[in-house]
Image (cartoon, grey):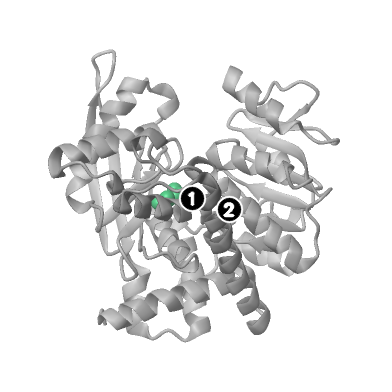
Amino acid sequence: MTVQLSDTLTPHQSVTYFFDRAADCIGLDDEMRDVLRGSYRELSVQVPVRMDDGRLMVFNGYRVQHNGARGPYKGGIRYHPEADIDEVRALAALMTWKTAIADLPFGGAKGGVQCETYLMSESEKQRLTRRFTGMIAYILGVNRDIPAPDMNTNAQTMAWMMDEFGKRYGHNPACVTGKPVELGGSLGREAATGRGVVFTAIEHAKRTGVPLEGARVAIQGFGNVGSWTARLIAETGARVVALSDIRGGIYNEKGIDVEAAWTQQTLTGSIVDLEGCDKLSNDELLLLDVDWLIPAALGGVIDSRNAANIKARVIVEAANHPVTPVADAALGDAGVTIVPDIIANAGGVTVSYFEWTQNIQQFRWEEEQVNEQLQKVMRKAYADVASYAENKSLSLREAAFAIAVQRVARAANLRGYV
Ligand code: GLU
């Protein structure tokens, strides 16, 4: 049974809805549909951690491997209270489609631990990471499954993971990506997702004639992805009029000084008190009268309740699944173009791929080379999708899923999966 459009779809049902549409569009046979709809393996673990005050807390952890037809499983590890099995399953499937669209030799996976990192000390996070890594290590590996950072995890988290993995199986930096540069991380990896978002926006602007220069841009989220997107899009001459983080948003019609916002966050932990800006909520930010809207935080923020009030003409999905299927349909009808997550935010995993190859070759690329190659991959992914969409009169999301599903199905066929 295919997933029907509804207001109450879970994250995984939403991703499956887009998959089903693509499967219909390319005429995928039922057997291959069954293989690609579900996860290959889902590991659920209990992660007990001794907190600094002596209490024991037990967290739920997951690693979901969705599909490995095109290569080793690949995807980040998220620390977030909402990272439950359904969410992680959805994100793992998105990784399969994302690596296929970027044409990287990887499958898709995702990990998550349901925890509130802002309440945890560095040593608590370290103990959590080591314990979790120890529990999932037997399904990981350089040629098997390679984690990376995601929401509330970073290069330090990857250093702990690499160390813990190495204790069991021997040191190999290629077992995780997004590591600190000192430990074999790639130059340019930290900015890569945001840089990829901006490269995609540039391609979209060129192709559609909707200029970025002087355009008014609102970005929701000022974590790794949102902050780098903001910095780099400002360099294109776009006017960033609104930004937000977990504590709220800021607005300045004349354009926010993004570097000042960055400094403000470094100094105070938040951008909300940046001088010269009006305050607004995260919900209000989404409804601003802007040219480009870039959700770069959680999934499902644009749904049936607010879709009709979105004023932006282009939405670039820096976050994973920020637009629900009902909202996607409504926005499409209203003529809003959505550049979907599986193209727009593929820059992170693309530079993860470069990091993995550098580690395997024991060689380091210059940052310039990383960024150049990233641009090439993003350009090609966007062009493949935009041409397919134009030829078949599809939305960019429909086209992206159709191409990705075709590529994965082809690999699965060649391997003789079905
Ligand atoms: N967590 C990032 C994503 O959602 C990067 C994954 C990776 O580098 O493997 O795409």
The N terminus is located in which quarter? Answer: bottom left
- Which residue is rendered at x = 32% and y = 34% of the image? 159
Q: Do the CB atoms of the residues marked 1 and 2 lie less than 8 Å apart?
A: yes
Q: Give coordinates of residue 237: x percent, y percent.
A: 79, 45
Q: Which residue is mark 1?
A: 348
Location of residue 107 with respect to 44 vertically, above or below: below
SS class of the residue under badge 1? helix
The image shows residue 61, relative to residue 416, as above or below, that is above
* Residue 87 in view of the camera: no
Label 2 CB less than 8 angstroms from ligand 1: no
Question: For this rendering, which residue is in front, 33 or 351?
Answer: 351
Q: Which percent across, then down, holds residue 37?
A: 37, 70
Q: Is residue 287 left or right of residue 262?
A: right
Q: Amino acid at mark 2?
A: Gly
Q: Quadrant of the C terminus?
A: bottom left
Local secondary structure at mark 2: helix
**Residue placed most toward the observer, 117 or 157:** 157
Label 1 lies in ligand 1 vicinity (Cβ under 8 Å): yes
Q: Position of residue 197 (x, y in %)?
A: 61, 52
Q: Amino acid at mark 1?
A: Gly
What is the quadrant of residue 157 in the picture? top left
Q: Quadrant of residue 394?
A: bottom right
10 Å neighbourhood of mark 2: few (<14), some, or many (≥20)? Answer: many
* Label 1 crowd bin: few (<14), some (14–19), many (20+), radius 10 Å: many
**Disc nearer the start of the sequence (1/2):** 2
What's the residue at 26%, 79% (across, down)? Answer: 415
Outermost residue to the left = 168
- Asked if residue 364 is positioned above or below residue 8 in the image, the reply reads above
Q: Is residue 213 left or right of residue 30?
A: right
The CA distance from mark 1 to mark 2 is 7 Å
* Image coordinates for residue 346, horizontal then vertical, percent: 51, 56
Residue with the mark numbered 2: 196
